[in-house]
Amino acid sequence: MKAGVIGAGAWGTALAQLLASDGQDVALWALEPDVVGAINGVHENPLYLPSIPLSPSIRATGDMADMAACDLLLVVSPAQHLRSVVRQAPAGVPLLLCSKGIEAGTSLLMSQVAQQAQPTAPIAVLSGPTFAHEVARGLPTAITLACEDVSLGQRLAARIARPSFRPYLSDDVIGAEIGGAVKNVLAIACGVAEGAGLGLNARAALISRGFAEMTRFGLARGARAETLGGLSGLGDLVLTCSSTNSRNFSLGKGLGEGARAADLLSNRRTVAEGAHTAPVLRDAARAAGVEMPVVEAVCALLADAAPLGTVIDALLARPLRPE
Ligand SMILES: NC(=O)c1ccc[n+]([C@@H]2O[C@H](COP(=O)([O-])OP(=O)(O)OC[C@H]3O[C@@H](n4cnc5c(N)ncnc54)[C@H](O)[C@@H]3O)[C@@H](O)[C@H]2O)c1
Ligand SMILES: O=P(O)(O)OC[C@H](O)CO
């Protein structure tokens, strides 16, 4: 039996490369026939993970039926497509969910969506500070693997751990998912600060106050504080808020430089999950009575609802309050 990866974007391809790094066969399902052809033909994914030579042990396919030969499936589609790809996956196989986001229309986390789409599949979540191109190059990385079934979590961790890839176990699935979803929205805010030249004090303030928002929302949804303060929460927040390697940070940088969200988002091939998560998160927070002013500000900019200066001034003019 072999592991399979569903989704051959940057992260799915990097995870397939990680799994194949000890020589084992890996099946990789890709949506685009060009990607299937390039991976099988020249062992590269020029569309989503260029300049990384891939292991010949990775076999790409466009036919989901081929994934029935796998005893573990990593699901790595964009969050808004997770329901449709999981529905097509073979039934009953353990699913390790690697997407970060909240489903629009339902406000469900990825584990909840997957449970609806594949009711008999055991489910776990993989989330943390992991730029795909670094993992694909074998650089040292630590990540949270969350699973309510502790013994399944231990087996999955042993299965995916590699000398430079270190999963830490948790049974707090909701906490791991909320960290990964919320940090993408906060990374857009930090990108705005960069693009608008607001300085590094502003970035640190956004990371800290954004983390307070993540924690308030997470606790309201049943997450544990230590999960939010771990790799999948604070760890990923720091990574994604610090580098233009992040698509979310780069999107925010463009907004901070004065571009319109619609122009930045039109015709892009890669996903900036925070743009999809932001309005869903804002509505879920409002419904739960959780204050998330940084998330509200990002939503205003994404919707082109107010000029940048007005949004920044409104954040700074909020009533003074205890930390
Ligand atoms: N790139 C990273 O470094 C990284 C790291 C950790 C987690 N993630 C998460 O992994 C998930 C996937 O991101 P990525 O970076 O691999 O993607 P990507 O931006 O590199 O590629 C886009 C992906 O979307 C897929 N896609 C487009 N339309 C689709 C459809 N209709 N149905 C199914 N799939 C469709 C494409 O086939 C491709 O796999 C996201 O939730 C992201 O937050 C990414
Ligand atoms: O490029 P981003 O902003 O989607 O971030 C990628 C990963 O989620 C970082 O952990």
Image (cartoon, helix red, strand yellow):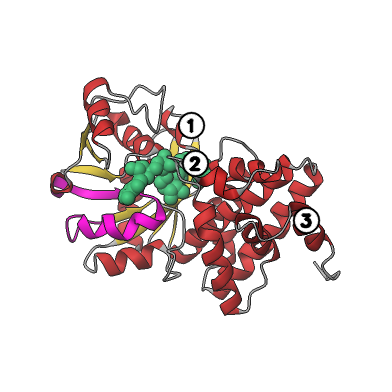
In depth, the one of 181 and 323 nearer the eye is 181
Name which residue type carries label 1: Glu
Say which label, 1 or 3, has the lower sequence index: 1
Verify whether residue 213 appears in magenta: no
Determine which quarter of the picture holds residue 314: bottom right
Where residue 221 appears, as percent x and y from the top left, is 52, 73
Left or right? Give the position of 284 relative to 186. left
CB contact under 8 Å: marks 3 and 2: no
What span is in magenta? 68-94
Mark identifier at residue 130: 2
Determine which quarter of the picture holds residue 60: top left
In depth, the one of 52 and 310 nearer the eye is 310
Mark identifier at residue 134: 1
Q: Which residue is mark 3?
A: 312
In depth, the one of 161 and 305 nearer the eye is 305
Ligand 1, image quadrant it occupies: top left
Label 2 beta carbon less than 8 Å to ligand 2: yes
Where residue 272 appears, as percent x and y from the top left, is 50, 47
Numbered label tally: 3
Q: Nearer the viewer, mark 1 or mark 3?
A: 3
Name which residue type carries label 3: Ile
Mark 1 and mark 3: Cα distance apart in space? 33 Å
In depth, the one of 27 and 47 nearer the eye is 47
CB contact under 8 Å: marks 1 and 3: no
Q: Residues within 10 Å of mark 2 (few under 14, many from 20)?
A: many
Residue at point 78%, 61% (across, down): 315
Q: Nearer the viewer, mark 3 or mark 2?
A: 3
Left or right? Give the position of 185 relative to 69. right
